[in-house]
Image (cartoon, rainbow, N blue to C red):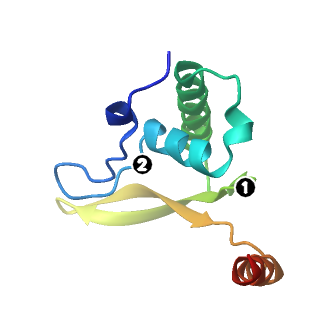
């Protein structure tokens, strides 16, 4: 059963004003940019696949220990940054997860720009 336009409407802002990318937003982008990729796959199954993929990435990032990078091809690199802060007069260990997007090679960007100018 296909999702309605209302169900697929991207809503990238949460009530607090921060950006949020929902699985339905990813599905819209895929259907727009690469429709052949999802041909024959019902929207509900595509959404389930997207959710499972995001959950797997999240689990891998969360279960990582130390400061070893977690590389996700096509997405980027997640790293745990270990630190310390003083809280209530005591030093407490902290962990931040930092994400760095993989940037496309310069020649790819230039080639795509040239194709857009010609097309």
Q: Which mark is residue 97?
A: none
Q: Residue at point 40% right, 36% down?
A: 8
Viewer-side residue, 90 vs 101? 101
Dot 1, how many residues are within 10 Å of its Cα: few (below 14), some (14-19), or many (20+)?
few
Among the 4 quarters of the image, the one containing residue 17: bottom left
Q: Residue at point 82% right, 82% down?
A: 107
Residue 109 coordinates in the image, percent (x, y): 73, 79
Viewer-side residue, 61 vs 89? 61
Viewer-side residue, 20 vs 97? 20
Rendered view: 46 above or below 77: above
**Of the image marks 2 and 1, the number of the one nearer the N terminus:** 2
Q: The residue tagged with tag 1: helix, strand or loop?
A: loop
* Apparent side of residue 114 relative to residue 69 in the rendered image (left or right): right
Residue 11 coordinates in the image, percent (x, y): 31, 47
Q: Which mark is residue 21?
A: 2
Rendered view: 114 above or below 34: below
Viewer-side residue, 105 vs 79? 105
Q: The residue tagged with tag 2: helix, strand or loop?
A: loop
Q: CA distance from mark 2 to mark 1?
A: 17 Å
Rendered view: 75 above or below 104: above
> Mark 1 = which residue?
74
How many numbered circles does the render carry?
Answer: 2
Dot 2, how many residues are within 10 Å of its Cα: few (below 14), some (14-19), or many (20+)?
few
Residue 50 coordinates in the image, percent (x, y): 57, 33
Q: Quarter of the image containing the C terminus?
A: bottom right
Among the 4 quarters of the image, the one containing residue 101: bottom right
Residue 49 coordinates in the image, percent (x, y): 61, 26
- In the image as oriented, which residue stretches furthest toward the front? 119
* Apparent side of residue 24 relative to residue 64 in the rendered image (left or right): left
Q: Residue at point 55% right, 23% down?
A: 48
Rendered view: 30 above or below 102: above
């Amino acid at each position: 059963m296909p999702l309605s336009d209302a169900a697929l409407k991207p809503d990238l802002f949460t009530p607090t004003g921060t950006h949020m990318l929902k699985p339905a937003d990813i599905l819209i982008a895929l259907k727009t940019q690469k429709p052949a990729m999802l041909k024959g796959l019902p929207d509900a199954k595509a959404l389930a696949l997207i959710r499972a993929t995001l959950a797997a990435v999240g689990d891998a990032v969360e279960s990582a220990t130390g400061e070893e990078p977690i590389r996700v091809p096509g997405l980027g690199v997640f790293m745990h940054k270990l630190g310390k802060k003083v809280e209530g007069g005591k030093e407490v260990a902290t962990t931040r997860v930092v994400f760095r997007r993989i940037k496309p090679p310069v020649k790819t960007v230039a080639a795509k720009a040239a194709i857009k100018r010609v097309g």
